[in-house]
Image: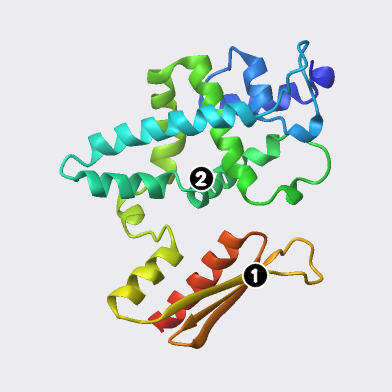
Amino acid sequence: MWAKKSGDHLLFSKLKNLLGYSPKKKNLYRAAFTHRSMNIRNDQGMPLNYERLEYLGDSVLSTIVSRYLFEELPKANEGKLTRMKSKIVSREKLNFIGKEMLLIDLLICTGKKEKFGDDIHGNILEALIGAIFIDKGYESCKKILNHVFFKPHIDLDSIANTVISYKSLLIEWSQKNKKNLVFETSSDNGKDPNINFYCKILLDNKVKAKSRDISKKKAEEKAAKRAVHLLKK
């Protein structure tokens, strides 16, 4: 089903070094590192790529992180646990961890990997977690993630001080300080086809920060981050 199953030795050799075991259900792990651009299908015509495993891995990771925080922070209330979990499973954090783990080196795709953007790193990580869950079960998956995810990448003290959304932080600050805050976001039809939105932040009718990015959300978040840093200065 995979064209000559190219790169099998490299894939499973690196996975053994990373995870500490040799995967049994190998087709799962091949799928976890196969991008839809390969257009591979099974005998029933169903796509074989990481997207379904990514969906599963997202849910499994959320459950395991919830349990991890419940055990590690026995004095934390529901609100703090919820905020901490949101920071750990945020797209930015998962992208960072996936990149640190060099998972994209194992991605099977067509074209240049750089074209997929930062989210590809987190997507592969979630797909890998989905494959581990099916292959090894919940308890083993939890132990493996403790070794490859929590211990090397999660520092709870640092996480507690992490800003998950500069836009939310800026809105909260403006309301508390009775400032007039406006996000002016529009489509950007400039020369760069990868930049589709332009955001301008006005604070008390004065331009505080500007930004362009691929999506409305990212343009606003980037502009908000710049505004927050300027306000700190």
Name the residue furthest left: 75
Q: Nearer the viewer, mark 1 or mark 2?
A: 1
Which residue is denoted by mark 2 in the rendering?
94
Amino acid type, mark 2? Leu
Amino acid type, mark 1? Ser
Q: Residue at x 58, y 26 (%)?
A: 53
Q: Residues within 10 Å of mark 1 (few under 14, many from 20)?
A: some
- Look at the image and tell me whether residue 12 can be seen: no
Q: Nearer the viewer, residue 107 or 224?
A: 224
Which residue is denoted by mark 1 in the rendering?
186
Q: Quadrant of residue 181?
A: bottom left
Label whose residue precedes the other's in the sequence (1 or 2): 2
x and y percentages locating residue 228 in the rendered image: 43, 75
Identify the secondary structure beneath mark 1.
Answer: strand
Q: Nearer the viewer, residue 39 or 140?
A: 39
Identify the secondary structure beneath mark 2.
Answer: helix
Q: Nearer the viewer, residue 166 or 185?
A: 185
